[in-house]
Image (cartoon, grey):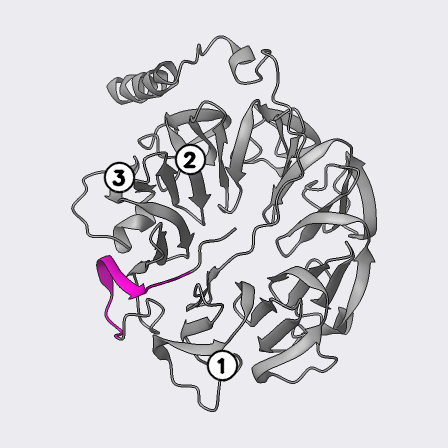
Amino acid sequence: MLKKFLLLFVLLFLLTNCGINVNDNSKLHDTDPPLMLTAKMPIIHNTVAFAGGRGMAIKRDGSVWLWGSQDKDNYYGDNIENITTPMKIMDQAVSVSMSISLQLVVCQDGTLWSWGGNQWGEIGDGTYESKSYPVKIMDGVLIAQAGSGNGLALKQNGILYYWGARTYDDIRKSEFSSPIPEKILDQVVYYTSSGGHLLAIREDNSLWGWGKNDNGALGLGHQFEVPVMKPEKLRDNVHYALINYLNSFLLDRSGTLWGAGYNAYGETGTGLADWWVTDYAQVLGKVVAFDTSGSFHSVAITSDGKLWTWGRNNSGQLGNGDSPDETNIPICIMEQVDKVFTTNDFSAAIKADGTLWVWGQSVSGIIEKEFEDFSVPNLITTDVYSVYLSVDSMLILKNDGTLWSCGANSVGQLGDGTFEDRSQPVLVMENVRLPE
């Protein structure tokens, strides 16, 4: 009984500390004048990528540097020895993306280059043969994304292309793959993909979706086993969207966040008790940023700088002190937050003063175990611009262009010239271009 009382007390304290009356849901679905997000969501050219035990970064001079895991199915150059120190591989780049099997680079002239494993045609060169050096895929590209057995590219003319595995369910069914980029949708200004399904926003702010929907993540009002094979219009007046394998979240032009999909642990944050939320339901008002990369939890920042989390909390990933084990409504855990990031079962936030804070039990294997409680935010370092998370390691990009790493290093993924795990951030390289 005492334990339950203490857990309830912690929850009430967190809610009260962030200005929430637990009996007043209007604070979660704000009735004050909404934000007016009239500008288009900017395209972010990622200058750092981190996945599959390898990293890639663009320096200020446009050169691309690679380090980390090399294996028989995905390696760069003429051998498969792991690269422990960043190695220059290309010039004149503006953005990079990578997954377990694929690397993509967009250059200043709009050309898209690709290499890696190619079992599903994910390189996009018309073959199923792996490539150990970059090959040109197409011209006129604005931004590209490497996925799990597939790739996507948005051209400067607003046409979205897709190639590779395309069952939206099980990429092992290679008969449903295409090694040649195919036009999917036009008038696109933004897209998001996470293996199972895809969302795209068009010039008129309409949201379109297609792919797997057995968890109701497309928000179509049902959860049919058969994938939606062509883009279908879902909503109007959408400003931004993000998805994970089980859920979709959209931000409308009033700043209201909406969620749909799997909800067994409250992942949608909608306050609904249903295991599946098949119609988009309201999560939170006055949202300016959010991330849905966690397996069963998500995070959002409101216009007042408050950070909210919801979903599963079995590893302290909500940052509220392990109480409760899960929540289906957003809980405020921090203030004065500028950026937020999340992965499987831990999260990170950058405050307005540039300090980096992390939480979640898997963090204990990444940073020095000097903190008593990883279920609440812990200060790591200062002057941070962005972070890039994996299951057991992390890259930290600082405002001065230095790139740092910490965590597991079994395949050289930290890029510090060793295979030694690091419990404190170590310098990887300097003069890295900040995303813009």
The picture places residue 398, in percent across and down from the top left corner, at 34, 51
> Callout 3: helix, strand or loop?
strand
Residue 31 visible to an observer of this rendering: yes
Highlighted magenta segment, given as a residue range: 418-432
Q: Which mark is residue 137?
A: none
In the image, what residue occupies the spot 44% across and 45% down? 342
Quadrant where the image shows the N terminus? top left
> Callout 2: helix, strand or loop?
strand
Mark 3 lies on residue: 378
The picture places residue 120, in percent across and down from the top left corner, at 67, 74
Q: Few, some or many C-alpha atoms within 10 Å of disc 2 (few <14, some 14-19, many ≥20)?
A: many
Q: Nearer the viewer, mark 2 or mark 1?
A: 2
Q: Few, some or many C-alpha atoms within 10 Å of disc 1 (few <14, some 14-19, many ≥20)?
A: many
Q: Say if mark 1 contacts mark 3, CB within 8 Å.
A: no
Q: Quadrant of residue 383?
A: top left
Residue 62 in the figure: left or right of residue 406: right
> Up-down: is 405 above or below 70?
above
Three-letter code for the amino acid on which mark 2 is drawn: Asp
Three-letter code for the amino acid on which mark 1 is drawn: Tyr
> Callout 1: helix, strand or loop?
loop
Q: Say if mark 2 contacts mark 1, CB within 8 Å.
A: no
Mark 1 lies on residue: 75
Residue 272 visible to an observer of this rendering: no
The picture places residue 407, in percent across and down from the top left corner, at 29, 59
Q: Earlier in the sequence, mark 1 or mark 3?
A: 1
Residue 37 in the figure: left or right of residue 348: right
**Closest to the observer, 344 or 405:** 405
Q: Which mark is residue 338?
A: 2
Q: Earlier in the sequence, mark 2 or mark 1?
A: 1
